[in-house]
Image (cartoon, rainbow, N blue to C red):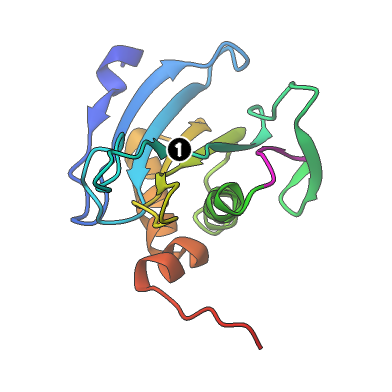
């Protein structure tokens, strides 16, 4: 089967959209790289402008976490030890509340990919999770969070779809955000 034949579109669950495409990862000579795009929330409105009367622009507050073959080479990336990868993880994010909210989502998804892959006996060479989302900078109301996964693995598209569906179901931070929570000062 050639690489073009391995590309497929998956029927996503109602709360997320997902597309898996296979492409050759130049750092892994024979390992396909999969790019997966998933939404964390049900907010399906295009992001670009808030609903404020004055058409306040909505900022995206993008973050990127990477591990394995997708660790960042950027000198500004912060490096942390990681339970599932000997080289640790890299984090590219500004230190604002909005960025940290998105970082919590991206970091949780990355960790859960490694954890669940181990349970499913799926080998992972690298993962990169990017997350962003809009905030109306006048009201600081979030328009939702979108995360994208780049994954390097010798597993089939079908095996990776099972893995990513499982991660989407069990990832604690996205689940907590979908359900909502109370935050109060003590």
Q: Secondary structure at mark 1?
A: loop
Q: Is residue 153 magenta?
A: no
Please indicate whether residue 107 sits to the left or right of residue 170 in the image: right
Residue 75 percent coordinates (x, y) = 80, 23
> Residue at coordinates 60% horizontally, 17% vertically from top-left?
28
- Horizontal side, residue 11 vs residue 169: left or right: left
Whether residue 21 is situated above or below residue 50 in the rendered picture: above
Q: List x then y, in percent, for residue 108.
A: 57, 56
Quadrant of the snapshot with the N terminus: top left
Residue found at x 30% / y 23%: 6
Q: Which residues are magenta?
A: 88-95
The percent position of residue 47, horizontal first and vertical second, equals 30, 38
Count the marks: 1
Left or right, residue 168 beside residue 95: left
In the image, residue 90 lies in the stretch drawn in magenta? yes
The quadrant holding residue 104 is bottom right
Q: Nearer the viewer, residue 126 or 130?
A: 130
Residue 173 position (above or below residue 53): below
Residue drawn 68% across the image and 33% down it: 68
On the image, numbered disc 1 is attached to which residue? 60
Residue ranking furthest to the front: 54
- The residue positioned 32% from the left and 32% from the top of the image is 20
Q: Quadrant of the C terminus?
A: bottom right
């Amino acid at each position: 089967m050639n690489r073009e034949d391995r590309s497929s579109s998956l029927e996503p669950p109602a709360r997320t959209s997902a597309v898996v495409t296979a492409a050759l990862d130049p750092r892994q000579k024979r390992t396909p790289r999969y790019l997966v795009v998933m939404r964390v929330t049900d907010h399906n409105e295009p992001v670009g402008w808030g609903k404020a009367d004055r058409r306040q622009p909505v900022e995206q507050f993008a973050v990127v976490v990477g591990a394995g073959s997708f660790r960042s080479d950027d000198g500004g990336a912060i490096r942390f030890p990681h339970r599932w990868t000997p080289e640790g993880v890299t984090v590219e994010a500004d230190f604002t509340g909005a960025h940290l909210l998105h970082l919590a989502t991206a970091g949780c998804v990355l960790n859960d990919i490694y954890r669940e892959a181990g349970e499913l006996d799926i080998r992972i060479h690298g993962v990169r999770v990017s997350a962003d989302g809009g905030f109306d900078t006048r009201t600081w109301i979030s328009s939702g969070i979108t995360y994208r996964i780049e994954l390097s693995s010798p597993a089939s598209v079908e095996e990776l779809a099972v893995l990513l569906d499982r991660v989407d179901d069990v990832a604690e931070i996205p689940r907590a955000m979908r359900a909502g929570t109370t935050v109060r000062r003590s």
